[in-house]
Amino acid sequence: MKKATIAMTALLVLAAVAPFARAQAGAAAQPEKDAAIQTALDYSDGAYSGDAARMERALHPDLNKLMFRRRSPATGLMAIYSTWSDLIELTRTASFSVDPEKRLTETSVLEINDDVACLRVKTAWWCDYLQLIMVGGRWRIINVLWTSGLSAPPQAKVVPGFDAGKERPAALQAALDYVEGRLSGDAARLEKVLHPETSQVTYMVAAKTNAAFVMRARYSGILEPVKAKLGLAPENARKAEARVLDLMDGMAFAAAQTALGAAYLQLQLMDGQWKVINVLVRPVKNSFPPAPPEKK
């Protein structure tokens, strides 16, 4: 088998069944937090101020950003996507322009673990959960789940009367169903928390070059390997320790750990059921194996 083919096969298997939790790092240093917050502000205040350069430097090209909105009281929720290019170009045309005193910006670091950061941003027009990864020494936003902002009327809420305390246990269970369902090959457990828009990005660092790269899988690419029992975790690595980092207006942000890697999950409450929408998986650092030497 050619060297490139072997490397690609290893990469695809790793991305499909990447282990979910890394050992918890110590508390992030303040400069790391400040840099992550600056990226969040480049994204949010960059949009409000019409500064396309700030927006562009905040975003990863493989950005997955979406929100859910009810089409009518009688129908379900629909996903609305924003792309890397439309965020930059709409910013360039000042489509999001809001005066500084009306932005109501609140930015919080929920967790930083080495080269992954989880942030919450609340503003007048949008309230966002951000997943960031470190690329080339800079934080970049890779996944966003968002909802209406602080100035939105009550009827704009996706989940009116959302009770965070009441919903926390169910959100935590949904995160565990996703992580442990994948690790153990329990397709039924995994499938019940999947949504057609579920997207998982696996963030890895190549051992040979130390270059960071990402691979993304969506609904079928997440579920079918589990149905086929591909790459199951060892028996002693199938349980996860999960935490809910935050809940906000029908959304939840969770983190899960096992002995093998880490997963950060953004979830949406949809008509009484929690669904996993965005997942950022970070296997143990440098776990992508280099290609074996080509046989002569």
Image (cartoon, rainbow, N blue to C red):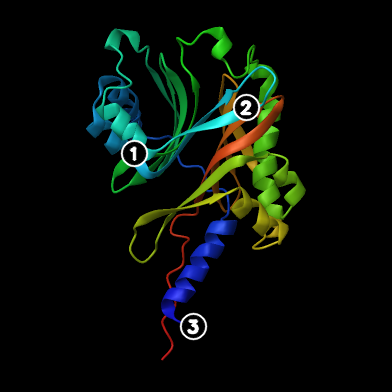
Q: Cα distance, mark 2 to mark 3? A: 47 Å
According to the image, label 1 marks what residue? 85
According to the image, label 2 marks what residue? 77
Sort mark 2 into few (<14), some (14-19) or many (20+) by Cα contacts within 10 Å.
Answer: some
Q: Cα distance, mark 1 to mark 2? A: 25 Å
- Of residue 131 and residue 289, the one placed in the foreground of this image is 131
- Of residue 296 and residue 275, the one placed in the foreground of this image is 275
**SS under mark 2:** strand
Q: Residue drawn 68% across and 60% down?
A: 234
Sort mark 1 into few (<14), some (14-19) or many (20+) by Cα contacts within 10 Å.
Answer: few
**SS under mark 1:** helix
Residue 145 in sight: yes
According to the image, label 3 marks what residue? 1
Specify the quadrant of the image occupied by residue 177. Answer: top right
Q: Residue furthest right?
A: 188
Q: Quadrant of the C terminus?
A: bottom left
Q: Give how far across and how far down residue 295 sits, in percent.
A: 44, 88
Q: Residue furthest bottom?
A: 296
What amino acid type is highlighted by mark number 3? Met
Q: Residue drawn 28% across and 11% down?
A: 99
Q: Give how far across and how far down residue 26 sits, in percent.
A: 45, 39
Q: Give how far across and how far down residue 258 sits, in percent.
A: 61, 48
What amino acid type is highlighted by mark number 1? Ser
Task: Assess whether mark 3 and mark 2 are in contact (beta carbons under 8 angstroms).
Answer: no
